[in-house]
Image (spheres, coloured by chain):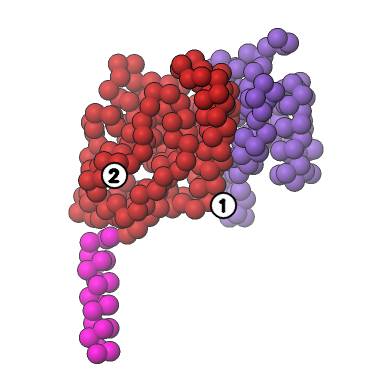
Amino acid sequence: MDLISGEKLEKMTSMEKIRLILDKVKTGRIVVLESGLTPDEEVRLIEMTMTEIRVDEFSGIEIESYPSKKEGSFFDKIFGRSIKGRMTVIGPANQIRTIEKDKYQISTKVSVGD
Amino acid sequence: MGFISSFKNSLGAWIKSIFKKKRAKIGIYGPPNAGKTTLAKRIVHDWSGDDDFGNVSHIPHETRRAMRKEGVVINANGSSIELDIVDTPGMATKIDFKEFMAFGLSEAESKKRAKEATEGVIEAIKWLDDLDGVLLVMDSTEDPYTQVNVTVIGNMEARKLPLLIVANKMDLPNASPARIKAAFPQHAMVQISALEGSNIDDLYTAIAANFG
């Protein structure tokens, strides 16, 4: 399992993040992103995942993040800051399964080996 | 002639403003088997009389190509809105051909369907860039906190585009639209049964209010 800091993610472009995640997940690693992805990055990750699905090799990802907060702060609106991502867990679809999820907690089951 | 033409244009604009008729391109999104195509078929049937819009199946990813119906005019609450309705393939983060074999499809058919389903997801994502709003269809009997729901809602919020949540399948005994409302309280929600047509007028009123 790899826990990637928000500081590292901030320095990466969207494409670098997506490539890093997919490369790790395709080798069976679980990735935890401290600051998550933006909504646009999430959807691009799903899009890229679809292009890389291969029969008997890679069936996709399990990705879990919290719903976005209701509203940005007053200063976020004033300065036009975009909605930031929240902690996100991503893993191979055949190894990670969500048990329960709500606004504040994500419970997952991780299978190791076959 | 110039005066008559100008008068006609002004009259047209005035009539249009009186009846608040607007046009919007609306995407129907959601996870596989949430009832997106059933809903699209009902809307198209109710407002254009067309019965040949899309196929419905219990096997996931039946819709693997986005389908568009132009110029569907919905009248509700004294206003009118003209919609281009885009029924999109089900969004997913994983597609395993073995899941289709469990529905009795052959291995070859399952692999073909899986390949087409991945292309469908990409197509659904591409459509997000070309819409004025989204109807997000959720299965009221399922957990609403799926990543597809979270991702679609996050994208619409980031793009500042209108979103209406459709809590579908309320005809089923274990449906819980309240659970969906509790999960995403910041967005308008209508509970319906697209299959039976119950509460469908509430949906049309909400469409006119949210997208008009």
On the picture, is B136 further left or further right than B99? left
Looking at the rendering, which quadrant does residue B202 occupy? top left
Q: Which residue is mark 1?
A: A77
Depth check, front residue: B186 or A65: A65
- The vertical placement of B166 against B15, above or below, is above
On the picture, is A107 further left or further right than B171? right
On the picture, is B139 further left or further right than A42? left
Disc nearest the viewer among 1 and 2: 2
Q: Which residue is mark 2?
A: B44
Looking at the rendering, which quadrant does residue B50 occupy? top left
Q: Say which residue appears at 38% left-offset and 20% top-offset.
A: B141
Q: Is residue A79 visible?
A: yes
**Colour used to depict chain B in the structure image:** red
Considering every residue shown, the one lying at the far left of the view is B78
Under tag 2, what secondary structure?
Answer: helix
Looking at the rendered structure, whether the residues under marks 1 and 2 are on a common chain is answered as no
Characterize the local packing of mark 2: few (<14), some (14-19) or many (20 or more) Cα atoms within 10 angstroms: many
What kind of residue is marked 1? Lys
**Colour used to depict chain A in the structure image:** purple
Q: Is residue B185 visible?
A: no
Give the main secondary structure of the magenta stretch: helix
Q: Say which residue appears at 76% left-offset and 42% top-offset.
A: A16
Magenta-drawn segment: B1-21
Under tag 1, what secondary structure?
Answer: helix
Horizontal and vertical percent for residue A34?
A: 71, 31
- Quarter holding the N terminus of chain B is bottom left
- Chain for mark 2? B
Depth check, front residue: A89 or B198: B198
Does the magenta segment cover residue B144?
no
Q: Say which residue appears at 52% left-offset and 25% top-offset.
A: B109
